[in-house]
Amino acid sequence: MFSQNNKINDGIGVISSQALKNKYLPSLNGLRGISIILVVMSHLPKYDNDIYLKIFNGHLGVNIFFCLSGFLITTLCIKEKELSGTISLKLFYIRRALRIFPVAYLYLAVLFLINSIFHLDIAKFQFVAAMFYLTNLSYFRSHNFTWFTGHYWSLAVEEQFYLIFPFILKKSSNTFYYVLIFIVFILPVFCALQEFFPRINNSVLYAFTHYFIKFQSISVGCLFSIITFKEGFNNTFFNFIQSYKVPLNILAFFLIFYLGYDDFYSLKAICVNLVISFLTSYIIISNVPINNDIVYKLLNNKQISFIGILSYSIYIWQQIFTSGSDKLPAFLVTLPFNIAFIIITPLLSYFFYEKYFLSLKNKYSILKHA
């Protein structure tokens, strides 16, 4: 399917590893499964101890999703560009819409009904912000913020990123690469200047850094995808780290949880989060090639992988059942009954609703990826 002589003429090069040629990239669903477990557990009533808060960090779970998304989407786009010579933006956005929109808008429709019945007092403009993927903007985060659509901030970040950046990748992979370098490495310098020299922290620079820094973890995932395509899985450095993969993966997981992802805007948080994103992306690429070690087996465990398949649906629907709202029936929002709804609702949503749109999505991919 992929010719060794079929080269991209703007710097990426041919696919050098069979692992990247495969239609299915192993371990990604396992990482999604771990991520959604972190998110859900962070939204449930917490035990007041440091260990629980370190492990079940919902912001960390979302950050892992961002790294995964950046890596996977960039990988698929580069493979399409190598195979066909270009990226069909029309097909790209159709696929994104069929993956994201159906359950996202179904949730909002159900929430609108629940809001009317139980008088949750969700402002109408919060529904509008969620519908148009604007919830990450500071105005909607600070004015009449509601838990019920609050999780749409991460969807907004992803959709805004993919509204802009595929155009750059389509035009020039090298330009895309340097834009990623700017976001990942240069933008934190601007953030540091803001902190050390408050006088330059005017409204324009403030808005610029606060907006684009949210793309950092997605950009790290994208960057690792491009580097992997450039260097492949067979170079000396990758062979070296694969020789010590299990201890390095265990160390990476330990550091990710020990450092503690912090969603708050500060120079320290930006630097720590950048390190976490690099460690996460390292774990991603080191577990793409098929292996027989304990980490690979864990990430490809059937149960964890199945949770990963349902992760997007779980992420959307769990917000109702973790709200703790005293306006909703107690059995919907209190333990252990809400756990049952967090399990059952995504299952019904996925198998009786989403799968139809996912089957349509596959028809619009020249790579025929799930």
Image: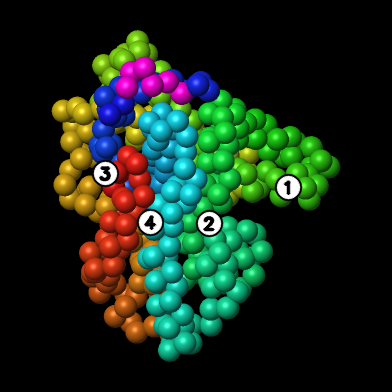
Few, some or many residues within 10 Å of mark 4 (<14, 14–19, 20+): many
Whether residue 5 is in magenta: the answer is: yes
In the picture, the disc for residue 153 is none
C-alpha gap between disc 2 and disc 4: 14 Å
Q: Position of residue 305 (x, y in %)?
A: 22, 47
Question: Which residue is the site of mark 1?
Answer: 206
Name the one closer to the observer, 307 or 274. Answer: 307
Element type at mark 4: helix
Image point (48%, 30%), residue name? 223
Q: Nearer the viewer, mark 2 or mark 4?
A: 4
Query: Left of 261 or right of it: where is 364?
Result: left
Question: Which residue is the site of mark 2?
Answer: 156
C-alpha gap between disc 4 and disc 3: 19 Å
C-alpha gap between disc 2 and disc 3: 24 Å
Element type at mark 1: helix
At label 1, the amino acid type is Tyr
Q: Position of residue 212 (x, y in %)?
A: 62, 44
Upstream in the sequence, badge 1 or badge 4? 4
Question: Which residue is the site of mark 4?
Answer: 99
Name the one closer to the observer, 364 or 114. Answer: 364
Q: Would residue 152 be seen by someone viewing this image from the given angle?
A: yes
Name the one closer to the observer, 42 or 347. Answer: 347
